[in-house]
Image: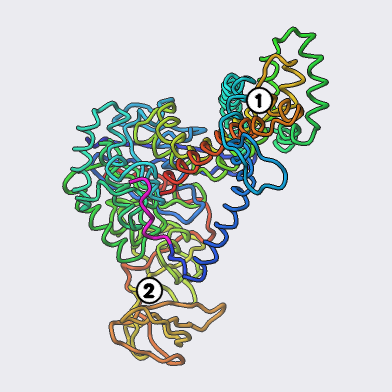
Amino acid sequence: MSGTLELRGLTRVHAAGQPPALAGFTLDVPAGSCVAVLGPSGSGKSTVLRLTAGLDSPDGGSVLLDGRDLAGVPPERRGMAMVFQRPLLFPHLSVRDNVAFADRVRGVPRRQARERAEHHLELVALRGYGDRPARALSGGQEQRVALARALAAEPRVLLLDEPFSALDTTLREEMHDLLADLRVRLDPTVLLVTHDPAEADALADTVAVLDGGRLQQAGPMRELYAAPASLAVSRLLGGRTEVPGTVRDGVHSSVLGALAVPRPVPDGPGVLVVRPEAVRVTSPADPAADATGTVVRVRRRGLRALVAVEVPGPGGASVEAELATGEELPAGRTVGLVLPVADRAVVPPVDGTPSDAARSPISHG
Amino acid sequence: MGLRKDPRAPHHSHARGGALHAGHAALAAWLVLPLVPLVLWAAADRWTAPAVLPQAWGTAGLRDAVDAGAGTGFLRSTVLGLVVAALATPLGAMAGRALATHRVPLGGAVLAVLLSPLVLPPFAVALGLDVLLLRLGVPSPVGVVLLLTVAALPYTTVLMRAAYAAHDRGFEDEARTLGATARQTVFHVQLPLLAPALAGAAFLAFLVGWSDYVVTLLVGGGQLVTLPLLVASAAAATGNEAQVAVLSLSSVLPPLVLLVAVGLVGRRARA
């Protein structure tokens, strides 16, 4: 059932004279894997899905399914099914006939299509809902039916366009569990689009970060967290600390002092980024401390607190750190900061073109 | 199933419900009251001035109406209304769709042209075009249908434009990715979703054909004797009020029946 999807240099210009919505986008989605395209709104991530589904045609590049170029193939013959953010259940059909839609338009007899629909409703834990009108469901149920309807089409690639973004947190987590469960049972190839790093992290094997229509970085989420390729990636993943400085011989010099960088970085100006979870707050006298500063702001984040520490110096620098569970620090306290070497990353100073390494397609899911 | 109530619909408070019911009653009275004397006249063999109710009941009015050609007139009006609806509804739907999706250059100007039959006096248009149609050798029934279709287009276009503007193209994208061809998408998704609007547009177009007098008289040249022509000639002639009442009723009732049918289609689609 599941196919291998390859996107090669996809480019789409919505209107002449405007910057392209998508520029030279390349991505591999191996059979049976789940790849997420992560980006802020307007980054071109929905365009990726529309071009893949054949709802829009690219101005450049190609979509390959199991090695076959899909140029000119209409959406209904691509073997893909899409679930949108809105459930889009056909209001004139019952829940069962919605799920049976793909079979019916393929000419499967009504009786058989309905039996198969019942089976797919069971897959999304909605057994017995078949007779209801499509409008008599809650938001979460609607999206489950939309998922069942897409699965019933037995697509070679399942396309998900922010399918859970409109649901509240609890329902969204339920849907994440459901999708994980369906992946184990059906092994579909999934291309997911989302603006939520947590969702990408929870569902996808690999993540491609898209910003301004260009691929910024692709790889496993852990890798993106550890070594973001650009400020855009760092910010999108919730990075808050950005310390400008200069790199020389693998050492970043800034207000924080000279800090060794774990990965090779070209010499020249660079911005040091480090995730708040990685920063350890200690006493100013601690010999392990990389820098000292003053707590200027405390923000609650569940059981943990997020503190902003101002490090004095020319230009100054603000470093954000997440405290251990239950730990408290008042604003105004002087503290020491430990930035573990492995968690330091340096990105190019201006938010511009990513390095060539970041452009390379994902090699494996 | 179709008429089941939406469980999420808000409950009206009693006060609001009461006001609503009073409003409905007033509206019903407004529509039904003028029909009462018509019904009485239709069944009156004799009804002279001071009497509150007819003095003699009977079917003389019905007999006279049938003799005057009410049966064939009814049939002609029905066919005329249906033909106009069958032409103006798909045309209006196509024009409305094009206008709503902004695929028409100078859409505003195009809409103004389509709406112009509402503004121009039908008498002048019919007289002017009559000459043109005669010169072109267009048979008069065809001319009547053509003109009435143009007269019905503003209604169907405006209605369908609003319907297409509110229509979510996402449903069609979804259907396509699920394997429906463009044609299947139109018949299995787009048309069912737009059925209430299409029924409304067809109803309005039917009414244009059904109730037309001026165009049928001038362009039809008296050959196409429809119900409105019969009503007018009967009303203009000597006082056979019973016959006029029967003819009037027979031209009022079919639209009423259709209206209820259209309402039911709309309710089923919203349920």
Residue A24 within the segment the image draws in magenta: no
Front residue of A257 and B130: B130
Q: Write down the chain letter for disc 2.
A: A
The circle drawn on residue A276 is 2
Looking at the picture, does residue A68 appear above or below residue A249?
above
Residue A307 at x, y percent in the picture: 41, 82
Could you tell me which residue is drawn at 33 percent across and 70 percent down? A341
Q: Which residues are magenta?
A: B1-9
Task: Judge from the rendering whether residue B18 lies leftward or rightward of residue B226; answer left or right.
Answer: left
Question: Mark 2: few, some, or many residues within 10 Å (few <14, many ≥20)?
Answer: many
What is the C-alpha distance between the residues marked 2 and 1? 70 Å
Whether residue A19 is visible here, answered yes or no, is yes
Identify which amino acid the numbered label 2 is placed on.
Pro
Point 39% across, 60% down: residue: B8
| Rendered image quadrant of residue A66 | top left
Residue A101 appears at what percent x and percent y? 31, 36
Extreme residue in the front direction: B55
